[in-house]
Image: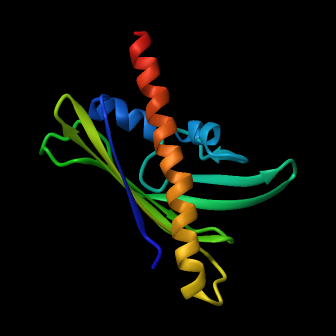
Amino acid sequence: MSAFRIVRRTGLDVEEAWAALTDFEAHGDVVPLTRLELDPGPPRLGWGLHAGTGVGPIRLWDHMIVTIWSPPPRIDATPAEFRVVKIGRWLRGWAHVVIEPDGSGSCVQWTEEVLPRFDPVPRLSAPLSRRAGERIFSRTVEGLLIRAEAADTLR
């Protein structure tokens, strides 16, 4: 198991943090060497996204599908959350994101497990996948929130 959790507090309210983190097209702007192709229409249950990582025409494509989609505002006071499951040829795993009110802002909890689909030695690959995932997704979450905070400041 290579699951890791990233927790970030932000001055953005839940709706603003949700908008920042579910702008999947923007993920390609903050994840190095990655381009995204998105299913038509807005994200929703069953909606898919495809991330291609590489240089030029040489890319490894990872396919994902949304399996939980509970945007804010939540009338029943439960947190906003979404879950994406990796169903592609190269990677397996999932990402589960929960956004809750926190004082005048919100708290984001991004939990993810990512492993190579073909994994002959999981005891070796799991710690490496976890460390790489923590670095990449910490930067992703931070980058998306910082962009949204900067845009919020300009208003």
Q: Is residue 43 visible?
A: yes
Q: Residue at x 73, y 47 (%)?
A: 33
In front here: 79 or 38? 79
Q: Residue 42: in sight, yes or no?
A: no
Q: Quadrant of the N terminus?
A: bottom left
Judged left or right of residue 88, residue 78 is: left
Q: Position of residue 43 (x, y in %)?
A: 47, 44
Q: Residue at x 59, y 41 (%)?
A: 40
Residue lying furthest right:
57
Compared to 125, does 141 lie above or below? above
Q: Looking at the picture, tell me which residue is in the foreground, 71 or 17.
A: 17
Q: Position of residue 84 (x, y in %)?
A: 46, 58
Q: In the image, is residue 123 above or below residue 131? A: below
Residue 57 appears left or right of 151: right
Q: What residue is rendered at 65% in x and 61% in y? A: 62
x 44%, y 27%: residue = 148
Residue nearest the viewer, comparing 37 with 108? 108
Q: Nearer the viewer, residue 43 or 147?
A: 147
Vertical placement of 127 versus 99: above or below? below
The location of residue 129, given as percent across then percent down, is 57, 70
Drawn side of residue 21 relative to residue 121, left or right = left
Work out which residue is located at the far top of the displayed protein and give it: 155
Q: Position of residue 86 (x, y in %)?
A: 55, 65
